[in-house]
Amino acid sequence: MDKVLSNKKMIALYVLPSLLLILAIVYIPIVLTAYYGLHEWNGIGAMKFVGLDNYQELLKDETFWKSAWHSFMLAIFSGVSLILYLIVAIVLAARIKGANIFRKIYLIPMLLSSVAIAQLWLKIFHPSNGVLNSVLESIGFENPPAWLAEPSIVLYALFVPILWQYAGFYILIYYAALKNIPASLEEAAKIDGASAWQVAWRIKLPLVMEVFKVTIVLAVVGSLKYFDLIFVMTDGGPNGSSEVMASYMYHQAFRAYDFGYGSAIGFFLLVICLIATWLIRKLTASKDTIQYS
Amino acid sequence: MTTIDAGRPLAGMARRRTGVGRSLGMVLLYAVLIIVAAVQLFPLVWLLFFSLKNNQEVFNLPPLSLPMNPRWENYEKVWSAGNIDVYFLNSVWITIVATALTVVLASLVTYAVTRMRWKGSKFVLGLFMVAMMIPVHSTLIPLFSLFNDTGLINHPLALILSYVAFNMPITIMILLGFYYALPREVEEAAIIDGCSVNRMYFRIVFPMTASVLATTAIINMIYNWNEFIFVNTFISSDAYKTLTVGVQNFIGQYTTDWGAIGATLMISILPILITFLVLSDRIVEGIAAGSVKG
Amino acid sequence: MLLTLSLAVVVAGCGSNNGNNGNAASNAPSSEGATESQGTVDTGGEKVTVNFMHLWPEGVSAGQNKIVNQIIDSYQTEHPNVTIKQEVLDNEQYKSKLKVLSASNQLPDVGVTWAAGFLQPYVEGNLFTPVDDLLSGELNGKFVAGTTEAYAINGKTYALPLEFNIAPVYYNKAIFEKNNLEIPQTYEQFKTVVKTLSDAGVAPIALGNKDRWTGSLWYMYLADRIAGQATLAGAINGSSSFTDEGLMKAATEVQSLVDVNAFVKGFNGLSNEEAKSEFLNGKAAMYMMGTWELPNFTTNEDIPQEFRDSVGFFKFPTVDGGKGDINSWVGGPGVGLFVSENSKVKDEAKKFVEYFVTKWGEQSVTGAGVIPATKVDTSALELPQLYIDLFNEMNKASSITLFADVQMQASAAETHLNMIQALFGKAATPAKFAEEHDAAIAK
């Protein structure tokens, strides 16, 4: 068995093409980003080597830390909402009538491009004739807030569409995980007199844990480098109250022509993701890898 | 006898009560399910209505109202604006090729990392994971010069390579949990039967994980279909652009034609919706196929 | 009557470079050897492709796109050896791509650029070629005075402008009539108008300050009227400070307008597009914007005739005791065309630009409602009254201050725009606003 499964040629054949592709397409930019980050460069003229100056500035840059905090909040929210997505997936995976149709409908928003989602939520959040405020006014709220203009609210208002946008993604993964459990196992448990909830808790959840751990990493990394809806809906505003690390990177590099500094932010963001991932892996590591018996 | 007789109605009542409780729970569950379903369908309906309005109506009417004269001409405008058919075909084939490549390559890597034994497998996995941590805007300038130097600029291959490379890490991550959880026994039996790695992978592992492969295919497809930053950056001639740039056709220097954008989005969501519905069933079928073998 | 435009425009701090006072368009000898090769390429034989990147997609900028295609067609007919290849992107994508292309030194032969602060890094990086030879050639005297200077750095001009705009306050005559309001002549009257409208439950001013430059317009006018054009220009180019009493008062005035609910609800979260629709739908009474919006108030059939007929404009009123002049405007040239320094077909590209600018000037007003930077003989054209009135105002202008975010260098412009949003959102005091500006401009 070991001999077959440690066949070097086969391993190389399976891994090398992808690895080379990643090294060329992703690692060249990573290395260059690190390199640009050590320079003062507007992206056009000559580069000037400044060592770690950009990073020193970054550590003192309040706007950066504010945006890092926003990204961090998003990561927390995304991580916590995974539990909700898992519950939805469990319900959808249960053998209830119409589950198939519900599942399909639930995942539809995931197909929409960010452009469409941004427009939709702009219409929902519009301060005077938006869906949300119309409803609030009709049930007696006077002067409901301008969701995207209020510095104290805007970030959380944006979290709603962001979390909603990715709900389908995680539900789909969890659903596949739940359905991947051989039906025989479930049958056996049922014969032993386990209720549907017991099946969910005692058999499905432990098996799904492996997948769940991975999704925590995906959710956290995805949140830390999140960009799309924030860029379209508020552009980080008002006055930076919804700025996140990736949008700050974009603003510095592409708007303020500070490509060196922008690259430093980009690389720092990568390091933060790396640390977060390492921490999550550490915290969720378990000795016993779950396997089907 | 009597004790049994006395016990029976009690047992019956208890059963009935749980029955009522259960069906009440079911009603509640369905109510919630249906409400959520309505919420999730809302964007699609909204988009349809949005695509039938002009700018005035987009901003003036409530999102879920249909204008007096639905403006089907928005669709006409989108179709007659040049190149949409070219963009469409490009979107289709680039999405298919990139998705297929990503899923196959990623599953091979995941298999080698999770099921095969070799030094450095952890390290290689780490390399793939780090690759998903770079913000996309940091990659544009380096990638542009890379493609430019290799003559791939303004070539669809630049898109395909980028899509595969950037979606591979996330695809591997998704597959990871599933591949770890595959029963060892299957492989052991296969090896005893004298199966080669290739055979084991293609005849056993691949079909057993068909459901999660379908899942990652859906996710990849959606990402590739909606991607536009790479298209705009690496492609300059109309012959290779994809549908996402069709939207840009209606964003002007000072004004934006929202109705036409809605129509473009509506047109571009249809193929992916249909594919999704088909692939989505594959998830279930894949499981059926897998469990037969398991 | 010949209404030819010929202004003595003062583009404040043009070139935005400290110590750069160059308007010398013609006295800069073209060192690139462009003059000697001028006219020698057009021998007909050699096949040449000129890449042209612009931002007028067919779908929405139909007028501009049509003109562009006509110009290209006729140019290609006249020069059968030349092929013009277009690439069209939307505004945001265009700017990003230009940046990426520059980093790899792969700019198109001809492209669209903005003035002053936007242009500067490209010039310093030697990516744009001077086009002074064109200015002294066939195009000599064709531009509205002062427009090309916004594209000049260290005495050389690096792009030729296509647009020329000023920003009046548009107002809804019907709403004004209903509330018995007159056009305000002074800032006090303006505040009364705001208060009357606000009390009547009408949003006085449509402002989409998510885009930030929109709010900047209001600050610019207040600064101009209170502190005077020269003071504002000095602060922007760094020769004096934003802590000037008049400029501080302007910032304070912005916040007091916010306090009396002068701007639509949630303005700091609204895009210009969303805010504009409040005005177009008759929900807001006033809207300050560049003259590029004129088609929406005159010829755009999508907008009800009734509304278009009720749009008027007024000049930003004077402030009592202020140093500003009512005929001083905020505005300036919009986009212009550059020729890449590293273009292999530089001479052909320049000739195309020359041709393009000329033809564009002839067609843009009637074809796309865009006021070109080249002089227009309005008597020869059938134009809506609003256009004629604004052409007249341009003629009477005492000065035109270029949009602050265009004047400033990119990083300072970002600070300016962010501080504008903070000022309007009352997240920054006028003192902080001034301090951050001075710091950013000094950098």
Image (cartoon, rainbow, N blue to C red):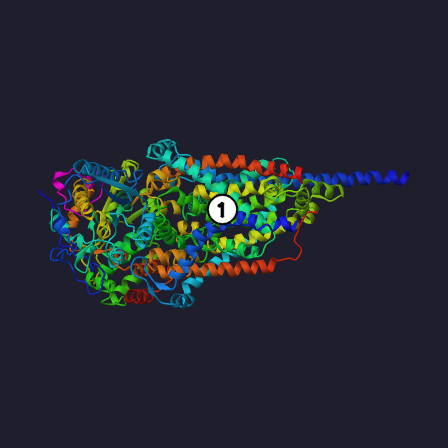
Asked whether, in this view, residue C211 is left or right of residue B15, the answer is left
Q: Which residue is drawn at 38% across and 44% down?
A: B231
What kind of residue is marked 1?
Gln
**Could you classify mark 1 by the number of other residues whose Cα lies within 10 Å: few (under 14), some (14-19), or many (20 or more)?**
many
Q: Is residue C300 visible?
A: yes
Give C380 or B18, whichever is nearer the viewer.
C380
Q: Which chain carries label 1?
A: A
Magenta segment boundaries in residue numbering: C364-384
Q: Name the residue under label 1.
A: A165
Give A212 or C366, whichever is nearer the viewer.
A212
Q: Main secondary structure of the magenta part?
A: loop
Residue B241 place in picture, x, y as percent: 37, 40
Give C258 or B293, whichever is nearer the viewer.
B293
Corner quadrant of residue B78? top left
Residue C304 place in picture, x, y as percent: 29, 36
- Whether residue C306 is situated above or below residue A150 in the rendered picture: above
Residue C378 is covered by the magenta coloring: yes
- Whether residue C120 is situated above or below residue B106 in the rendered picture: below
Give B30 or C246, whichever is nearer the viewer.
B30
Q: Which residue is drawn at 37% across and 62% down?
A: A261
Residue B165 place in picture, x, y as percent: 46, 48
Under circle 1, the secondary element is: helix
Corner quadrant of residue C398? bottom left
Residue B86 is covered by the magenta coloring: no
Residue C257 place in picture, x, y as percent: 32, 57
Q: Residue at x 62, y 58 (%)?
A: A285
Corner quadrant of residue C387? top left
Quadrant of the snapshot with the C terminus of chain C: bottom left
Q: Can residue B39 be seen in this view?
A: no
Residue that protrudes farthest toward the left in the picture: C1
